[in-house]
Image (cartoon, rainbow, N blue to C red):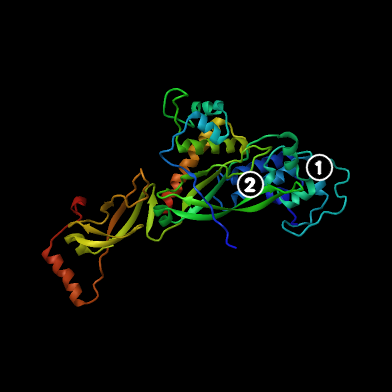
Amino acid sequence: MTEQKIYIQGVVLNEETRCTLTDLCRLCGVTAELIHDMIEEGILSPEGHSPQEWRFTFIAIKRVQTAVRLQHDLRINLPGCALALELLEELEELRRLSQRS
Amino acid sequence: MEYKDYYQILGIARDATQDQIKQAYRKVARKYHPDVSKERDAEAQFKNAGEAYEVLKDPEKRAAYDKFGANWRDGQDFQPPPNWDAGFEFRGAGYTEGDAAGFSDFFESLFGHGHADRQRQHVFKMKGEDQHAKIIISLADAYSGAKQTLTLTRPAVDDSGHVRTTPHRLHVVIPQGITEGQRIRLEGQGLPGYGGSPPGDLFLEIAFQEDRLFHAEKRDIHLTLPITPWEAALGAPLTVPTLGGNVQVKIPPGSQSGKKLRLKGKGLSTGSQRGDQIITLYIVVPEPKNEEQRNLYATMAQKMPFNPRSELGT
């Protein structure tokens, strides 16, 4: 008997992805309050002026998820998460560059 | 069942104080956190450390564990003696920290499967957890899109309430023009929910296989193209590989090493985003193999006076 393969088509989170505050909260399983705090901390910088107008990129989704894991697993507070995220992104960029040379 | 040396996992002595255990755990957790570490087995190390800490931070569990003695080696075949836990009270107490779903058989047979118990007791309805995985694809697959079958291991609770990791096969579509670091969200393909709640999502992060010829930077594909000095000087039509097959490219006369040519749309393009192929020319000077060839270079030196170092003032 051959296995029937059903291919699943996902949604690509790419540079065109924009989501609202509600989407972001649902996607990452967090409260709007936490998103607020992350914006205050400079972890996220959405487009738009008011919470209703805010649009977040795919990078925001990744940052929120990473920050939540760091908070939970390593007990890092939000300013610490902001620093860790910046350093991790810089490290990734440096690793990418050093691979090329 | 394999014995686990929790002291060795945290890198501490068997007589370490509770404070030392806490410090050692935090250090190992930071080092191997899957978001931080690039080591291949970071996730396993992180889970091991969580399990070790779960036992050693609790004086009662630690005392029970210590009763096995110091002569066991990590990975050694092990069966707990009957009634080894007489006099201790920790079964079903639940866990305070750590993700117990990934704990080992060793842990479970000693301390029970509190994770599943806890879910039954306290969590009536909860959306399943999201799962994250990395998939490595070829540049060719990223260029034209592909279908892939992947196998993820995921914890599942069996009929008797034990947590087991089971392989989970999944067939997914890799859309055309995906780039490194982008993620595909597969709704409802994460871990199952509890109490009739929906399952979590699966996030697949894309990484590229090392390619012999090409490398990607965001949507652009880079290729270094070796050319001869006369092709560079006089210009030439050349056959150049791209991820979509060979194409004809005209090298303009008077090209220098390092000159870049752009082939529009030959990178990682989607319906709405364009990626290009960037060709970097690289002039390769042939070694003269006989007298005649050496003379050709000598003639050039005579007939084409040229100082490439004029800007250096020498």
User: Which of these two is toward me, A22 or B180?
Assistant: A22
- Check the image and report above or below for B253 versus B22: below
Q: Which residue shows up at 29% across the image and 55% down it?
A: B280
Point out which mark residue B193 bears: none
| Quarter of the image that includes the C terminus of chain B | bottom left
User: Which of these two is toward me, B54 or A20?
Assistant: A20
The disc, 2 or 1, on the residue closer to the chain's N-terminal end is 2
What crowding class fits label 2: few (fewer than 14 Cα within 10 Å), some (14-19), or many (20 or more)? Answer: many
| Marks 2/1 same chain | yes
Farthest bottom residue? Answer: B291
Disc 1 designates what residue? B91
Q: Which residue shows up at 33% across the image and 56% down it?
A: B223
**Percent coordinates x, y for residue A79 in the rendering:** 54, 30
Left of A18 or right of it: where is B278?
A: left
| Quarter of the image that includes the N terminus of chain B | bottom right
User: Which of these two is toward me, A80 or B269?
Assistant: B269
Rendered image quadrant of residue B58 = top right
Disc 2 designates what residue? B46
Q: Is residue B17 visible?
A: no
What SS does tag 1 mark?
A: loop
Q: Is residue B60 visible?
A: yes
What amino acid does circle 2 point to? Phe
What SS does tag 2 mark?
A: helix
**Percent coordinates x, y for residue A4 in the rendering:** 56, 57
**Percent coordinates x, y for residue B143 in the rendering:** 39, 53
Question: How far apart in space, not on screen, are marks 2 and 1 (Cα)?
Answer: 24 Å
Left of B159 or right of it: where is B311?
A: left
- Check the image and report above or below for B1 versus B180: below
Q: How many marks?
A: 2
